[in-house]
């Protein structure tokens, strides 16, 4: 008996395709240095070099569900029939709302704004439930800004405020802010002084030099006190009881901030979604502005979803406002509270919804969800989300970044190209939205004069 006859067959090794410098779109860091290996027979990502734990989960858990291209009232249909039905829903509506957009490409976002304009609806993004207050503050006081590359190369004092990057943006510390060696901070972590301001001691507190645990709902007062100190004015001593931070500590912090060569405030939803909301963001942005009388300071929001910054950019360059924009009168009107989706649904106002890459049925208030369930909804989502389950028309889509190319914006407003790993049998958001827009325009042109002006 020969050796070949008794030896077990060698296990078949998977055929791997490597995509270098792929972009992770799981969080607003949008790391574009991930080398991914794809098992081409299984269409499965088996390696994601340099991705953090969240990025690895994003890549490894990606699989293509065996679902119909689309459904109408739960009945499987092809894309063409669903596009016709979606156009019908949106054209018949008197007050349609377009919502989501933070987990899709900027190319798709742009078409979604155009559709909303053609049908005279309201366009809103998930910014309205995260950094919307910062968007309002930018409109009020502006933003002293920079790229994450500048923070990496220059920042020697960092103020993390109301966020927990160690768990929400794991590579922010190592790639952009706290740890890396930069041109003007050649010793990396040793050249930087980092402070965390938060209401609770999170994992990020271990990584910084100083943790200031402030009392809940006192962010505005703390930021305003620092503004006073920046101008050489002592705050009222009652600030100690209000914030839980002593005046001596605040004075010492201000001295350190003034001594910085380049300081950066990186603020999260602990600032924007607590009492004060847009006034908190205003105070933090104004503090960064005031500090420029002494030295260079910037303030940047820490953005969550992969392309929520793109949504802000696209809606702003299209309408002049970042979210919650009504186009019903043929010109843009911005009014958070009136034109933000969770509010207008809770008041029972919208009569149709176009939801793109978002799941409001899993996180909106009960009155908003009740109303959403009572109106015709068009959903584009790679997954069978709770919102897709109640949709009149639900499209199955390819996953952006993993299956489709396009552009996303990093949290510092830098556009980054996507390098997809493999193709999906499903269409992209962009292709489906383009189809819906085309049908809407054909039907509008066939029935009379234009009503929109994208
Ligand atoms: S930090 Fe964010 S973008 Fe970077 S790899 Fe992790 S999850 Fe992905």
Image (spheres, rainbow, N blue to C red):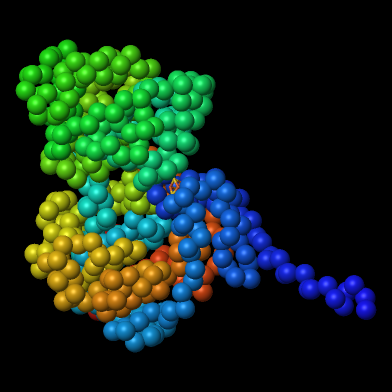
In the picture provided, is 424 more to the left or to the right than 227? right
* Rendered location of residue 167, percent (x, y): 37, 45
Q: Is residue 427 left or right of residue 381?
A: right
Count of marks placed on residues: 0
Left or right, 31 with reference to 46 = left
Tell me if residue 39 comes above or below residue 251 in the rendering.
Answer: below
**For the point 22% across and 52% down, which residue is it?**
128
Estimate the x, y position of residue 435 in percent, counting from the top left. 39, 72
Residue placed at 40% from the left, 73% from the top?
A: 396
Whether residue 31 is visible here, answered yes or no, is: yes
Q: Nearer the viewer, residue 198 or 328?
A: 198
Where, quadrant-wise, is the C terminus in this rendering?
Answer: bottom left
Residue at left 43%, top 79%?
A: 67
- Residue 194, image quadrant: top left
Q: Nearer the viewer, residue 214 or 398?
A: 214
Q: Is residue 331 visible?
A: no
Q: Residue 394 at x, y = what percent? A: 33, 76
Going 35% across and 39% down the picture, which residue do you hit? 203
Q: Is residue 99 above or below residue 276?
A: below
Give the residue furthest to the bottom: 75
Q: How far across and how far down the image is residue 287, in percent?
A: 22, 26
Front in this rendered view, residue 228 or 353: 228
Q: Is residue 114 left or right of residue 251?
A: right
Q: Residue placed farthest to the right in the image?
A: 1
Q: Can you say which quadrant of the picture contains the N terminus?
A: bottom right
């Amino acid at each position: 008996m020969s050796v070949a006859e008794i030896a077990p067959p060698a296990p078949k090794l998977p055929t791997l395709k490597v995509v270098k410098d792929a972009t992770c779109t799981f969080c607003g860091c949008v790391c574009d240095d991930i080398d991914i290996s794809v098992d081409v027979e299984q269409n499965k990502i088996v390696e994601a070099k340099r991705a953090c734990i969240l990025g690895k989960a994003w890549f490894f858990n990606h699989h293509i569900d065996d679902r119909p291209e689309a459904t109408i009232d739960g009945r499987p249909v092809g894309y063409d029939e669903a596009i016709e039905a979606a156009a019908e829903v949106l054209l018949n509506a008197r007050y349609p709302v377009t919502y989501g957009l933070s987990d899709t490409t900027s190319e798709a976002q742009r078409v979604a704004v155009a559709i909303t304009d053609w049908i005279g609806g309201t366009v809103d993004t998930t910014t309205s439930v995260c950094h919307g207050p910062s968007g309002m503050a930018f409109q009020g006081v502006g933003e002293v800004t920079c790229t994450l590359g500048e923070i990496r190369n220059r920042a020697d004092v960092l103020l993390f405020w109301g966020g927990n990057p160690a768990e929400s943006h794991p590579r922010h510390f190592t790639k952009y802010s706290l740890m890396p060696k930069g041109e003007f901070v050649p010793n990396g972590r040793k050249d930087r002084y980092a402070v965390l301001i938060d209401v609770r001691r999170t994992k990020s507190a271990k990584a910084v030099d100083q943790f200031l645990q402030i009392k809940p709902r006192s962010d505005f007062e703390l930021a305003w006190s620092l503004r006073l100190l920046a101008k050489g004015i002592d705050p009222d001593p009652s600030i100690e009881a209000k914030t839980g931070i002593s005046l001596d500590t605040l004075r010492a912090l201000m001295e350190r901030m003034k001594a910085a060569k380049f300081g950066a405030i990186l603020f999260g939803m602990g600032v924007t979604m607590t009492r004060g909301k847009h006034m908190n963001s205003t105070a933090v942005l104004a503090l960064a502005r005031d500090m420029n009388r002494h030295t260079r300071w910037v303030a940047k929001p820490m953005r969550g979803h992969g392309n929520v910054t793109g949504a802000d950019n696209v809606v702003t360059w299209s309408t002049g406002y970042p979210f919650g924009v009504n186009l019903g009168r043929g010109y843009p009107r911005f009014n958070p509270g009136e034109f933000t989706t969770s509010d207008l649904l809770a008041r029972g106002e919208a009569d149709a919804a176009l939801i793109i890459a978002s799941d409001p049925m899993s996180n909106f208030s009960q009155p908003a969800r009740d109303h959403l369930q009572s109106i015709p909804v068009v959903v584009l989502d790679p997954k069978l989300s709770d919102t897709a389950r109640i949709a009149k028309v639900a499209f199955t889509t390819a996953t952006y970044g993993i299956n489709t190319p396009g552009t996303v914006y990093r949290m510092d407003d830098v556009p980054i190209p996507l390098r997809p790993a493999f193709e999906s049998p499903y269409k992209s958001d962009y292709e489906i939205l383009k189809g819906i827009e085309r049908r809407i325009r054909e039907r509008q042109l066939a029935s009379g004069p234009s009503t929109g002006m994208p």
